[in-house]
Image: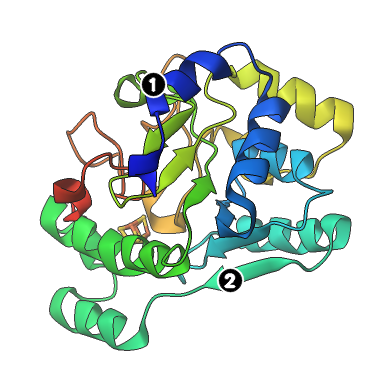
Amino acid sequence: MIRSLNLDKLNQEAHRWSSQDIIDHGIKRFGDRLSFASSFGLEDMVLLHMLKDYSIDIFYIDTGRLPIETYQLIEDAEKRYGNRFRSIHPEPDELSRYVAGYGINGFYQSVEARTACCHVRKVRPLARALDQQHAWFAGLRAEQSSYRSTLAFFEDDGYNRVRINPLKNWRWQDLWDYIDSHQVPFNRLHKQGYPSIGCQPCSRAISPGEDFRSGRWWWEKSRKKECGLHNHRRQEDAPE
Ligand code: SF4
């Protein structure tokens, strides 16, 4: 699919578009072969509100280790936007093998153990959820980390699909302004110092001035705080 697109040209045009324009373009171009992968983070709540009048496929990955506050938000979102979210889960046998090999909280042991957990609980379910799709929306922003500073609006996700990042240039305060003005529900953990919320055991609050993603896997020294969902090249699909 992606080979038939001129992403450079598309991105040049997108610099003149609003986030809603980018969403509209994605829906027009990819139709039913487009999904929105939501984590119910602040960015994704903005996107969800922007997508509220479209019948696009929206899914989330329930890793089994999400914070209770995220499940509460999903219920709030169902009440506000309808029960339209497809829940995706780790494959039971793969998860059993992981737990048997590393233990129930094995992700703290090593980078290898942590990335193996992300692979089973997140990367593989994402691949299954997007198997038939040509494109997907994600809430990535360039401000989130140095690793994401080179984001494009439309980019190759490494699997012959287009990842669309309508909020690429949004700042943290822009998100809050949108959330406030449209009365969009949000995860209460954001008010407790969590800019980025993933699984409960692997997310914590940060201090003012710290990198947005420094609360993710905080015990690891790597500056690249990624679980593998948003890698750019296929060879990086292996756990980081
Ligand atoms: Fe496992 Fe933590 Fe990754 Fe969640 S964030 S999949 S619990 S290692």
Marking on residue 68 = none
Which residue is farthest front? 4
Circle 2: residue type: Ser
Q: Amino acid at mark 1?
A: Asp
* Residue at which label 1 appears: 8
The residues tagged by marks 1 and 2 sit, at their Cα atoms, a distance apart of 33 Å
In the depicted structure, whether residue 202 falls above or below residue 78 = above
Q: In x, y percent, where is residue 147?
A: 30, 25
Residue 131 position (above or below residue 147): below
State left or right for residue 232 relative to residue 168: left
Residue at 59% of width from left, 62% of height from top? 59
SS of the residue under disc 1: helix
Residue 234, how many percent across, how many down? Answer: 20, 49
Q: Position of residue 63 (x, y in %)?
A: 44, 67
- Judge whether 166 appears above or below 11 on screen: below
Lower position in the chain sequence, tag 1 or tag 2:
1
Relative image position of residue 110 (x, y in whole percent) = 12, 54
Q: Residue at coordinates 47% horizontally, 53% vertically from top-left? A: 134
Q: Could one spot residue 110 in this view of the protein? A: no
Q: Who is closer to the viewer here, 86 or 214?
A: 86
Mark 1, Cα crowd under 10 Å, few <14 / some 14-19 / many 20+, is few
Helix, strand or loop at mark 2: strand
Mark identifier at residue 87 = 2
Quadrant assignment, res 28: top right
Label 2 crowding class (10 Å Cα cut-off): few <14, some 14-19, many 20+?
Answer: few
Colouring rule applied to residues: rainbow
Q: Residue at x 78, y 42 (%)?
A: 49
